[in-house]
Structure formats: C-alpha cells, structure tokens
Amino acid sequence: MLALFCLMLLAAPLTDAWKSSQPRLHFQHSELMRSGRLVSLSMPAGDLNSLLPDEDGRRLYIGMKDHLLSTSLDDITQNPRKIYWPANPDRIQDCTMAGKTLEMDCANFLRVLERYNQTHLYACGTGAFNPRCAFIPTNLFLRAEEQTLQDEDTESGRGKCPFDPHQRTATAIIDGELYAGISSDFLSHDTAFIRSLGERHVIRTEQYDSTWLQGAEFVHVTAMSESDNEEDDKVYVFFTERAQEAEGAAGKVLYSRVARVCKNDIGGQRSLVNKWSTFQKARIVCSVPGPDGIQTHFDKLQDIFIQHGRDKKNPLVYGLFTTTSNVLNGSAVCVYRMQDIIRAFKGNFLHREGHQYKLTEYTGRVPYPRPGTCPSSTYGGFRSTREYPDDVIFFSRTHPLMQEVVRPLGGQPLLIRVGVPYKLTRLLVDRVEAVDGQHDVMFIGTDSGLVLKVLHFPKANRQNQEVTLEQLQVFKHKSAITAMTLSKKKQWLFAGSAEGVVQLGLFQCDLYGQACAECCLARDPYCTWDGHSCSQFMPTGRRRNIRQVNDDGNPLNQCVRQGDTACQHPSSCHTEQSKDG
C-alpha cells in the first residue's frame, strides 16, 4: 500500500516530465535507411560489447563474441576485417562440465577493448571462464580479411577481465596502465577495482571486504586532474553496489557510487600492501523530490559520460540511471558538476558504531595527512603512500565511505522516462557550436533499439531543461543497444546490438521544412537557415555575421530581419529560446 501511495504522489510530476518530453520527430528503421542517414552492418553474434573509434586512422574497432572486427569509420559496410578469437577447446569443455551453457557462457566474450598506443590495441575476453588478454597490432587487420588469433599469442586475463560474461566491467588505460572494475573470481564473489600492466606492482581493493565493495557492477573509469600538480591526479570509477548503510528488514538495497584513488597510490608499507591506500567512495543520488519527504530514486547506474568544457577541472558528469522498484519502472538522466563530487570527498566520513555496527557519522579525530590525499609536494611532502603513518593507513582501510551524497544540478533529473515500453541503456553527449552559443546534445540508446536525440541547456537559475528532438528506430528488430560511440570528426553515431552495428548521421536538416520559421523552431543546434534552406550550421566568421541571434534570444527574429514571410510576428509562435549555459 505504501508503495502504491508513493507512486500516486509522484504520478503528477513524473507525468508532466514525460508530456514535456515527447519527441518532435519519429523515424522508423525503413525511413532512416531510405534517406541514407542510417547505414547498417548486420553480423548477428549474440553479443556485442565494445565500440572503439580511431579518428586518425579512420577505423572503428568492434568487440563481440569470439571476434574482433575493424571497419571503416566513413562507411562501416566497406571492407570489414575480422580476427577470430575463440576460447581454448579444453577450457570450453571444462566450462560446460561445470554446468555452464555453451552459447551463453562458454565462449570468448570480449569485455575489454582499449587503445594501448598508436600501433596497438589491448583486448581481453572471458575465454570460457578463463580470461585471456592480448596486445593486438592494428596493422594485423591488413594482412587478411579474416584470420585467427592463436592461444599462444595471448596472456592471462586474471585481474583484467571477468570470468563471467554477464558481469558488468569498466576499464581504461591511463598512462600505459589498465584500471579495471571487474568481478575477479570464477564465482563472481570478489568484485574489485584493480590496476595492472605497466611496471608497478598490481594494486587492488581489499579482497572480500564488503565495507569496500559489495557486489559492485562497474560502469565507467576516468582520470581527472584536480590541481596544476600532476601528483594530485585521481582516477574515478562509477558503479552500483549493495548499500550496507541502507540494508535492514527490507533486504538488499542498491546505491550508485563514485569512488576515487590517487594515480600515484602504491599501497601501504605494513598494512594494505599492494592495496589501494587512498580508496574512497560516495553515493550518487538521482531522484525526483516528492511531498512530505517522499522521493523516488533511480538507483541503478547504467552509463556515464564526462563532458569537458572550458574548465578542464570541472566537467559535467552525465549519468543514466534506471529504477530497481517493481512499482515504478523507469529511467532518468541526471547531470552533476565535478566540483560537487570533489566536495563530497572533502566532507565527513561514515564509520561503524554500536552493538549493531550501524554506519554513522564519524566525529573523532581524522589523522594527518587526511585519508584520500595523494602523496605530493602540495600536502605534507610525502613521496609515496608507503611513507604514510600507520594511523592514516588504518583509517583508510576502515573508513572508505563518505557521509555526504552527490546530488544533481537543479536537485532533480534532467530527463525522465516512465510509462514507456523501453528503458534507457547507453548515453553519449555531443557539445555543439550553434548560432546562439554551445549546446549539449544527448544521444540515448534504449533496450528496444531506439536512439533518442535530446537537447540539454542549463538555465540561469541552475534548473535544467531538455527538448527531445528525435526518436530514431536504428535497429530493425528492436534489439537492445549495448554499445555506443561517437565520431566527432565524421559526425556519425555508432551503435551496437545483437543485430550488429549501425552508423547514424547526427542530423538531417532538410527534414525541418522549406521555410525559415520551421527551421528555427526545430531548435536543432546542428542546423540553421542560410537564407535559402535549412542546412548544417558551420561556425565560421562569415556565417556568424549573417546569422547571429541578438540578445532577445528569439530565433524567429532572424526570419523577420531577412524578410521571410513565414512568421512576421515571432511573439505569436510561443517559443522559448535557450540561453547559452
């Protein structure tokens, strides 16, 4: 009854959010194919996890079950090259004998695909519950249209790739080292954040310690600079896990988290040897505030996109979430500032207290240097984490969780989808130079083969606003989108599913009619009225002088100035033009 009451209270704001976000244009798969905006490469393999663009080499690399592909970034159907990378036959037999299924478990599911340097990729697969990795020269694809990677050309993938293909994995190669959030054992009991490769010792989170990680599902890894001193650089990992601070009679509760470690962390001297000594985590909240303190939470993190701007140390963090509730089935996008995430790590710690060991605010003395601080000339002059005092290492091991939570801009989601026949799965953001400044355009994949094109612009009062421009059915059989990437140079979006890979043009300006008013009211930042037709906006000085919107911010005034009769009275068109955020 309580769940139903909460849903009724929240129905009005959620419904309003949905109504305001109806897509302006809908396109079926057949329409996109006929127009030439969509190119499709069918290769049903049952699993496609990674898309890695190489802008300079004009290639797209694709990681899937038993195969690694390379194809043209200009046209994915042109001359695709394939490396066949099966699991070892003996391991396949062991896997099936252990009760796993041949098609769903006992194959080589590629889960790591990273650019190692200018000439090599680094890739890992589950190898029928025996993970293997390989350095793959990019020129290997040029030798033949199809070839096989031999087992002797690979190395152990333990600590780099999960055993189980159904476990979420997040990886990044940073300064030649692999940072991986994975389940690191056969039974997927040990979820860990691990640094390997390179010349330093392998380092990881504390093993089988639920205070650090408990059933984590990793989503994204990224490096971040916080000062002009590179010794202070951190690596952030985003994930969802079971929340110890919220578990009780209701049972398992999931929270989304952001954790961070110092890049120069090498562990402790006597405790936390080859374990992170700077690991800290905080909760990320994406919820709709309700009356009487009732909130509905989108608890499960699905994707993260980091949007860098002029301030390199304070990017926007876009998070895509879904609900875990059986009552409210929906998805949301929340936007965070990096400075708000950093602030959470400067706050108070939680610790266990009382006979029930409940997590409460820690009010005692915090040792120096403050746990989580990187060894650097900025703070204390420590040369490495092995020089940290024992009380700092002990505190870090027992107090990884911060009290303060990270809340989104505006205090609520930017975008909400409830009561629709799909969930959101993947998220990309393209910052577009438009007539009236910069805008962020979100491309959101769904579990029904749709891509939503959504315009985001922050308002002056920090309230976010979004307009859904297009809904595009990019996969014919409506299979879930499992990977997406963007070619900024080529202006293509690439999406992968069990059906294969598609290549989608980011815009199609001629769809917006043959009149100035129609073009301007479309609000698509990729497009502009050039005096004759709706066409792609090119941010050059000459075009800017012709098309610059003045301070009143009304896009239709440009039509009046140019004598277009489509809309002689702009105020009657009831449009609200966005301001540059």
Image (spheres, grey):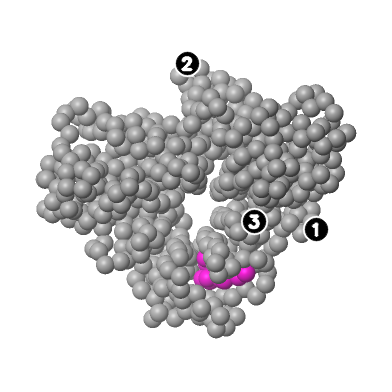
**Rendered residue at 11%/45% (across/down):** 390
Location of residue 146 with respect to 50 vertically, above or below:
below
How many neighbours does mark 3 have within 10 angstroms: few (below 14), some (14-19), or many (20 or more)? few
The amino acid type found where label 3 is placed reads Gln
In this rendered view, identify the residue nearer to me: 544 or 526: 544
Location of residue 498 with respect to 417 vertically, above or below:
below
> Whole-Å distance between the Cαs marked 1 and 2?
52 Å
The amino acid type found where label 2 is placed reads Asp
Main secondary structure found in the magenta portion: strand
- Closer to the N terminus: mark 1 or mark 3? 1
Mark 2 lies on a secondary structure that is helix
Mark 1 lies on a secondary structure that is helix
Q: Which residue sits furthest right? A: 565
**Rendered residue at 84%/40% (across/down):** 515
How many neighbours does mark 1 have within 10 angstroms: few (below 14), some (14-19), or many (20 or more)? few
Q: Which quarter of the picture shows residue 79?
A: bottom right
> Whole-Å distance between the Cαs marked 1 and 3?
19 Å
* Closer to viewer: mark 2 or mark 3: 3
Identify the residue position indicated by label 3 in the image. 491
Residue 407 in magenta stretch: no
> Whole-Å distance between the Cαs marked 2 and 3?
46 Å
Q: Can residue 271 be seen in this view?
A: no
Please report the bounds of the magenta region as a residue range: 62-72
How many neighbours does mark 2 have within 10 angstroms: few (below 14), some (14-19), or many (20 or more)? few
The amino acid type found where label 1 is placed reads Arg
Residue 153 position, x and y percent, is: 40, 79
Identify the residue position indicated by label 2 in the image. 292
Identify the residue position indicated by label 1 in the image. 34
* Closer to viewer: mark 1 or mark 3: 3
**Rendered residue at 58%/21% (across/down):** 8
Mark 3 lies on a secondary structure that is loop
Q: Which residue sits furthest top? A: 292
